[in-house]
Amino acid sequence: MSRNRFGDKVIIVTGGGSGLGEDYCKAFCAEGGRVVCADIDAATAARTTQALNKAGGTALAVTCDVTKAHDVERMVEEALHAYGRLDVLVNNAGVIRRRSLVGTTEEDWDREIDTDLKGPYLCARAAVPHMKERGYGKIVNISSVAGIVGCISTAYAASKAGINGLTRQWALELAPHGIRVNSVAPGYTATPINEKLRQTPAAKRIGETIPLGWGKPADMTAAVLFLSANESDYITGQTLAVDGGL
Ligand code: NAI
Protein backbone atom coordinates (compact mmCIF):
# COMPACT_ATOMS: atom_id res chain seq x y z
CA MET A 1 0.00 0.00 0.00
CA SER A 2 1.27 3.45 -0.96
CA ARG A 3 2.53 5.50 1.98
CA ASN A 4 1.43 8.52 -0.02
CA ARG A 5 -2.17 7.53 -0.78
CA PHE A 6 -3.38 10.92 0.52
CA GLY A 7 -0.35 12.94 -0.58
CA ASP A 8 -2.37 15.66 -2.31
CA LYS A 9 -5.40 15.50 -0.03
CA VAL A 10 -6.86 17.61 2.76
CA ILE A 11 -9.07 15.73 5.19
CA ILE A 12 -11.33 17.00 7.96
CA VAL A 13 -12.04 14.49 10.73
CA THR A 14 -14.70 15.61 13.22
CA GLY A 15 -14.31 14.19 16.70
CA GLY A 16 -10.68 13.66 15.71
CA GLY A 17 -9.24 14.28 19.18
CA SER A 18 -9.84 10.83 20.68
CA GLY A 19 -11.01 7.28 20.03
CA LEU A 20 -11.61 6.22 16.44
CA GLY A 21 -11.26 9.76 15.08
CA GLU A 22 -7.76 10.01 16.52
CA ASP A 23 -6.86 6.75 14.80
CA TYR A 24 -8.22 8.05 11.46
CA CYS A 25 -6.16 11.27 11.83
CA LYS A 26 -3.00 9.26 12.52
CA ALA A 27 -3.57 6.97 9.55
CA PHE A 28 -4.31 9.83 7.12
CA CYS A 29 -1.14 11.63 8.25
CA ALA A 30 0.91 8.44 7.94
CA GLU A 31 -0.20 8.21 4.31
CA GLY A 32 0.70 11.81 3.50
CA GLY A 33 -2.63 13.56 4.11
CA ARG A 34 -2.97 17.02 5.58
CA VAL A 35 -5.45 16.68 8.41
CA VAL A 36 -7.83 18.98 10.24
CA CYS A 37 -8.54 17.44 13.62
CA ALA A 38 -11.80 19.07 14.72
CA ASP A 39 -13.19 18.38 18.17
CA ILE A 40 -15.45 19.99 20.76
CA ASP A 41 -12.71 19.20 23.28
CA ALA A 42 -9.94 21.70 22.54
CA ALA A 43 -7.42 19.88 24.74
CA THR A 44 -7.73 16.50 23.01
CA ALA A 45 -7.65 18.11 19.55
CA ALA A 46 -4.47 19.98 20.53
CA ARG A 47 -2.84 16.89 22.07
CA THR A 48 -3.58 14.71 19.05
CA THR A 49 -2.42 17.36 16.60
CA GLN A 50 0.82 18.02 18.47
CA ALA A 51 1.64 14.30 18.47
CA LEU A 52 0.92 14.06 14.72
CA ASN A 53 3.07 17.08 13.85
CA LYS A 54 5.86 15.83 16.10
CA ALA A 55 5.80 12.52 14.23
CA GLY A 56 6.30 14.37 10.92
CA GLY A 57 2.64 14.71 9.90
CA THR A 58 0.73 17.84 8.90
CA ALA A 59 -2.23 18.48 11.17
CA LEU A 60 -4.27 21.43 12.38
CA ALA A 61 -6.42 21.47 15.52
CA VAL A 62 -9.78 23.22 15.31
CA THR A 63 -12.13 23.50 18.25
CA CYS A 64 -15.59 22.87 16.85
CA ASP A 65 -18.96 21.81 18.18
CA VAL A 66 -20.60 20.05 15.21
CA THR A 67 -24.07 20.96 16.50
CA LYS A 68 -23.34 24.68 15.92
CA ALA A 69 -23.53 25.92 12.33
CA HIS A 70 -21.23 28.84 13.07
CA ASP A 71 -18.49 26.55 14.48
CA VAL A 72 -18.80 24.19 11.53
CA GLU A 73 -18.52 26.99 8.96
CA ARG A 74 -15.43 28.30 10.75
CA MET A 75 -13.93 24.79 10.75
CA VAL A 76 -14.22 24.60 6.95
CA GLU A 77 -12.87 28.15 6.56
CA GLU A 78 -9.85 27.30 8.74
CA ALA A 79 -9.16 24.19 6.65
CA LEU A 80 -9.29 26.21 3.43
CA HIS A 81 -7.21 29.01 4.92
CA ALA A 82 -4.51 26.60 6.12
CA TYR A 83 -4.38 24.21 3.17
CA GLY A 84 -6.28 25.86 0.28
CA ARG A 85 -8.50 22.89 -0.51
CA LEU A 86 -10.74 20.25 0.99
CA ASP A 87 -10.98 16.71 -0.40
CA VAL A 88 -12.44 14.50 2.32
CA LEU A 89 -14.88 15.02 5.18
CA VAL A 90 -15.10 12.27 7.78
CA ASN A 91 -18.25 12.84 9.85
CA ASN A 92 -17.09 10.97 12.93
CA ALA A 93 -18.01 13.07 16.01
CA GLY A 94 -20.61 11.23 18.02
CA VAL A 95 -22.10 10.69 21.47
CA ILE A 96 -24.14 7.90 22.97
CA ARG A 97 -26.35 7.60 26.02
CA ARG A 98 -27.33 4.00 26.71
CA ARG A 99 -31.03 4.33 27.55
CA SER A 100 -34.14 2.25 26.99
CA LEU A 101 -37.07 3.72 25.07
CA VAL A 102 -38.93 4.68 28.25
CA GLY A 103 -35.71 5.78 29.95
CA THR A 104 -34.81 8.22 27.17
CA THR A 105 -35.47 11.82 28.16
CA GLU A 106 -36.14 14.56 25.63
CA GLU A 107 -32.76 16.00 26.60
CA ASP A 108 -31.06 12.64 25.74
CA TRP A 109 -32.94 12.56 22.43
CA ASP A 110 -31.96 16.13 21.50
CA ARG A 111 -28.29 15.70 22.44
CA GLU A 112 -27.82 12.49 20.44
CA ILE A 113 -29.82 13.59 17.41
CA ASP A 114 -28.10 16.99 17.41
CA THR A 115 -24.60 15.54 17.57
CA ASP A 116 -24.98 12.32 15.58
CA LEU A 117 -27.45 13.42 12.87
CA LYS A 118 -27.64 17.21 12.68
CA GLY A 119 -23.85 17.51 13.08
CA PRO A 120 -23.04 15.51 9.90
CA TYR A 121 -25.69 17.52 7.99
CA LEU A 122 -24.16 20.85 9.09
CA CYS A 123 -20.64 19.64 8.24
CA ALA A 124 -21.61 18.34 4.81
CA ARG A 125 -23.55 21.53 4.07
CA ALA A 126 -20.47 23.61 4.83
CA ALA A 127 -17.98 21.37 2.98
CA VAL A 128 -19.89 20.55 -0.20
CA PRO A 129 -19.76 23.98 -1.92
CA HIS A 130 -15.92 23.75 -1.98
CA MET A 131 -15.99 20.17 -3.25
CA LYS A 132 -18.49 21.15 -5.97
CA GLU A 133 -16.18 23.96 -7.11
CA ARG A 134 -13.43 21.40 -7.74
CA GLY A 135 -15.77 18.70 -9.07
CA TYR A 136 -14.47 16.11 -6.62
CA GLY A 137 -14.88 15.15 -3.00
CA LYS A 138 -15.51 12.34 -0.56
CA ILE A 139 -17.78 12.24 2.46
CA VAL A 140 -17.45 9.31 4.84
CA ASN A 141 -20.21 9.26 7.43
CA ILE A 142 -19.60 7.24 10.55
CA SER A 143 -22.73 5.28 11.26
CA SER A 144 -23.05 2.25 13.55
CA VAL A 145 -24.43 -1.28 13.51
CA ALA A 146 -27.02 0.25 15.84
CA GLY A 147 -28.47 1.96 12.75
CA ILE A 148 -28.83 -1.40 10.94
CA VAL A 149 -29.78 -4.00 13.53
CA GLY A 150 -30.68 -1.74 16.45
CA CYS A 151 -29.12 -2.02 19.88
CA ILE A 152 -28.24 0.08 22.88
CA SER A 153 -30.23 3.30 22.62
CA THR A 154 -33.36 4.79 21.04
CA ALA A 155 -31.94 8.13 19.90
CA TYR A 156 -28.60 6.63 18.87
CA ALA A 157 -30.26 3.95 16.70
CA ALA A 158 -32.47 6.62 15.12
CA SER A 159 -29.59 8.96 14.38
CA LYS A 160 -27.38 6.24 12.89
CA ALA A 161 -30.25 4.86 10.74
CA GLY A 162 -30.75 8.47 9.66
CA ILE A 163 -27.09 8.67 8.66
CA ASN A 164 -27.53 5.64 6.39
CA GLY A 165 -30.48 7.40 4.73
CA LEU A 166 -28.55 10.65 4.34
CA THR A 167 -25.69 8.70 2.80
CA ARG A 168 -27.95 7.38 0.03
CA GLN A 169 -29.66 10.76 -0.46
CA TRP A 170 -26.41 12.72 -0.69
CA ALA A 171 -24.80 10.09 -2.94
CA LEU A 172 -27.62 10.56 -5.43
CA GLU A 173 -27.69 14.35 -5.19
CA LEU A 174 -23.93 14.90 -5.31
CA ALA A 175 -22.78 12.29 -7.87
CA PRO A 176 -23.16 14.79 -10.75
CA HIS A 177 -20.59 16.96 -8.93
CA GLY A 178 -18.08 14.13 -8.54
CA ILE A 179 -18.72 13.86 -4.79
CA ARG A 180 -18.88 10.32 -3.40
CA VAL A 181 -20.75 9.66 -0.17
CA ASN A 182 -20.50 6.45 1.82
CA SER A 183 -20.74 5.38 5.42
CA VAL A 184 -18.91 2.99 7.66
CA ALA A 185 -20.97 1.28 10.35
CA PRO A 186 -18.59 0.13 13.08
CA GLY A 187 -19.50 -2.68 15.41
CA TYR A 188 -18.36 -2.78 19.04
CA THR A 189 -14.86 -1.33 19.23
CA ALA A 190 -12.91 -0.49 22.38
CA THR A 191 -12.70 3.34 22.67
CA PRO A 192 -13.49 5.94 25.37
CA ILE A 193 -17.16 5.99 24.23
CA ASN A 194 -17.73 2.53 25.77
CA GLU A 195 -15.20 2.66 28.60
CA LYS A 196 -17.88 2.24 31.31
CA LEU A 197 -19.63 -0.56 29.39
CA ARG A 198 -16.36 -2.46 29.08
CA GLN A 199 -16.04 -2.52 32.88
CA THR A 200 -19.31 -4.48 33.23
CA PRO A 201 -20.06 -8.19 32.63
CA ALA A 202 -22.20 -7.10 29.66
CA ALA A 203 -19.05 -6.45 27.63
CA LYS A 204 -18.13 -10.14 27.69
CA ARG A 205 -21.70 -11.18 26.86
CA ILE A 206 -21.72 -8.75 23.90
CA GLY A 207 -18.41 -10.16 22.69
CA GLU A 208 -19.93 -13.65 22.69
CA THR A 209 -22.73 -12.52 20.33
CA ILE A 210 -20.26 -11.19 17.73
CA PRO A 211 -18.92 -13.97 15.47
CA LEU A 212 -15.44 -12.36 15.32
CA GLY A 213 -15.55 -10.70 18.76
CA TRP A 214 -14.92 -7.01 19.59
CA GLY A 215 -13.27 -4.86 16.92
CA LYS A 216 -10.09 -2.80 17.07
CA PRO A 217 -9.81 0.84 15.90
CA ALA A 218 -7.50 -0.34 13.09
CA ASP A 219 -10.36 -2.42 11.65
CA MET A 220 -12.52 0.70 11.26
CA THR A 221 -9.61 2.82 10.04
CA ALA A 222 -8.88 0.49 7.12
CA ALA A 223 -12.48 0.89 5.88
CA VAL A 224 -12.57 4.67 6.39
CA LEU A 225 -9.31 5.18 4.50
CA PHE A 226 -10.46 2.93 1.64
CA LEU A 227 -13.69 4.94 1.22
CA SER A 228 -11.70 8.20 1.41
CA ALA A 229 -9.13 7.22 -1.21
CA ASN A 230 -9.25 7.40 -5.02
CA GLU A 231 -9.32 3.61 -5.21
CA SER A 232 -13.01 3.61 -4.14
CA ASP A 233 -14.09 6.29 -6.62
CA TYR A 234 -16.70 4.03 -8.25
CA ILE A 235 -18.42 3.35 -4.90
CA THR A 236 -21.11 5.70 -3.61
CA GLY A 237 -24.24 5.46 -1.46
CA GLN A 238 -23.01 2.43 0.47
CA THR A 239 -23.04 1.63 4.17
CA LEU A 240 -20.23 -0.77 4.96
CA ALA A 241 -20.72 -2.68 8.21
CA VAL A 242 -17.36 -3.39 9.86
CA ASP A 243 -18.74 -5.40 12.73
CA GLY A 244 -17.15 -8.86 12.91
CA GLY A 245 -20.31 -10.40 11.48
CA LEU A 246 -22.68 -8.98 14.11
P1 NAI B 1 -15.11 8.71 21.46
O1 NAI B 1 -16.03 9.16 22.55
O2 NAI B 1 -13.85 8.05 21.81
O3 NAI B 1 -14.80 9.92 20.48
C1 NAI B 1 -15.79 10.82 20.07
C2 NAI B 1 -15.11 12.15 19.82
O4 NAI B 1 -16.13 13.07 19.37
C3 NAI B 1 -14.51 12.76 21.08
O5 NAI B 1 -13.21 13.24 20.82
C4 NAI B 1 -15.47 13.89 21.45
O6 NAI B 1 -14.84 14.98 22.12
C5 NAI B 1 -15.96 14.29 20.07
N1 NAI B 1 -17.25 14.97 20.11
C6 NAI B 1 -18.34 14.67 20.86
N2 NAI B 1 -19.32 15.58 20.65
C7 NAI B 1 -18.84 16.46 19.74
C8 NAI B 1 -19.37 17.63 19.12
N3 NAI B 1 -20.60 18.08 19.41
N4 NAI B 1 -18.59 18.31 18.23
C9 NAI B 1 -17.34 17.88 17.94
N5 NAI B 1 -16.77 16.79 18.51
C10 NAI B 1 -17.52 16.09 19.39
O7 NAI B 1 -16.02 7.74 20.54
P2 NAI B 1 -15.60 6.74 19.37
O8 NAI B 1 -15.86 5.36 19.82
O9 NAI B 1 -14.28 7.10 18.83
O10 NAI B 1 -16.75 7.08 18.31
C11 NAI B 1 -16.51 7.77 17.11
C12 NAI B 1 -17.69 7.52 16.18
O11 NAI B 1 -17.83 6.12 15.93
C13 NAI B 1 -19.03 7.99 16.75
O12 NAI B 1 -19.83 8.56 15.73
C14 NAI B 1 -19.65 6.69 17.24
O13 NAI B 1 -21.06 6.75 17.27
C15 NAI B 1 -19.15 5.71 16.19
N6 NAI B 1 -19.20 4.33 16.63
C16 NAI B 1 -18.36 3.86 17.61
C17 NAI B 1 -18.45 2.55 18.00
C18 NAI B 1 -17.59 1.97 19.08
O14 NAI B 1 -17.82 0.83 19.47
N7 NAI B 1 -16.58 2.68 19.58
C19 NAI B 1 -19.43 1.62 17.40
C20 NAI B 1 -20.24 2.22 16.38
C21 NAI B 1 -20.12 3.53 16.01
Image (spheres, rainbow, N blue to C red):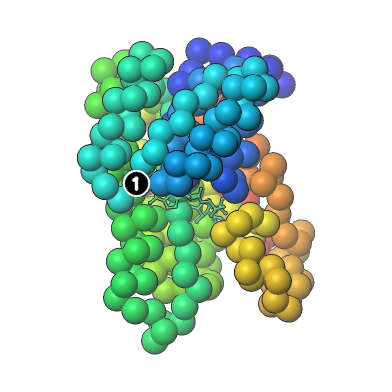
Which residue appears at 30% of the width and 50% of the height?
67
Give the side of residue 182 with respect to residue 245, left or right.
left
Direction bottom: furthest residue:
102
* Residue toward you, 150 or 75: 75
Label 1 packing within 10 angstroms: few (<14), some (14-19), many (20+): many
- For the N terminus, the image quarter is top right
- Residue 36 position, x and y percent, is 46, 29
Which residue appears at 67% of the width and 57% of the height?
190
Note whether residue 169 is visible.
no
Which residue appears at 41% of the width and 84% of the height?
103
Residue flagged by tag 1: what amino acid is it? Val
- Residue 154 position, x and y percent, is 42, 74
* Residue toward you, 228 or 58: 58
- Residue 112 position, x and y percent, is 38, 63
- For the C terminus, the image quarter is bottom right
Question: Judging from the image, what secondary structure is the residue with disc 1 in?
Answer: loop
- Residue 39 position, x and y percent, is 44, 42
* Residue toward you, 177 or 40: 40
Note whether residue 76 is visible.
yes
Disc 1 C-beta below 8 A from ligand 1? yes
Q: Quadrant of residue 29?
A: top right
Which residue appears at 35% of the width and 46% of the height?
65
Count of marks overlaid on the render: 1
Q: Quadrant of residue 173?
A: top left
Residue located beneath label 1 in the image: 66
Give the side of residue 189 with respect to residue 15, left or right.
right
